[in-house]
Image (spheres, rainbow, N blue to C red):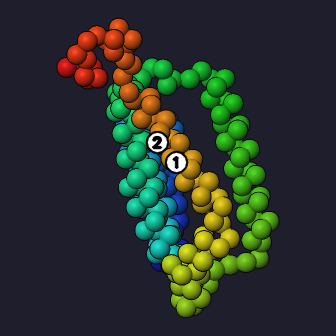
Amino acid sequence: MSVVEVLFGLLGLMALGSALLVVTTRHLVHAALWLVVTLGSIAGCYLLLSAEFVAWVQVLIYVGAVVVLLLFGLMLTRAPIGASNELDSSLGQRLAAAITAGATAAVLVTSVVDAFHGDHIDLSDDSTVRAAGSSHSVGEAVFRSWVLPFEVLSLLLLAALVGAIVLSRRDISPEVVAEPGHTGEVGR
């Protein structure tokens, strides 16, 4: 085993452990911070596979933007930030979630093994790996083959942002708006 394979395994274990902590913690803010660790370790895996562009996109977009948006959503919607008993689920719900997660993992592993059976990435030949993970090849794949899903995802994120803004607005009662001299500001 090479050093790269050992580091890849350690980062994979860190991603798995922190992902389990994301879904098992009772503190929503702690869950978001464990999500940062999960996404950061996945970015480390990308770096070890010589896909630097994908790794930095992972850090900038997912760690930098999505988690920050999640934390802003928690703050703006006045969700409980500390420990919450509402997040505690019954044994039946946990069992159903575990069965669903196991079935999803089985389908994903089976699909990946079937799709890439016998293929491997030779990390000793840097020129082939760098060409596969370069910004040119990623940009070509995204904007040639995957442009429609990319645009649909951007519309979905825009709808989520508009939804967060709508949820965070304070309700204005009709009586307050009808008062003479009302400037539209509430709660001052």
Name the side, left or right, on which 98 lies relative to 16.
right
Q: Looking at the image, can residue 106 be seen? A: yes
Residue at (65, 66) in percent of width and height: 146
Which residue is disc 2 drawn over?
161
**Residue 84, label in figure:** none
Report the residue that reaches farthest toward the right: 114
Query: Residue 61: which quarter of the image?
Result: bottom left
Q: Against 70, is 112 above or below? A: below
Q: Residue at x 19, y 20 (%)?
A: 188
Q: Secondary structure at mark 2?
A: helix
- The percent position of residue 77, horizontal first and vertical second, equals 39, 28
Circle 2 Cα neighbour tier, 10 Å, few/some/many (<14 / 14–19 / ≥20): some
Mark 1 surroundings: few (<14), some (14-19) or many (≥20) residues within 10 A: few
Q: Would residue 25 be found to the left or right of residue 113 on screen?
A: left
Residue position marked by numbered label 1 in the rendering: 157
**Residue type for callout 1:** Leu
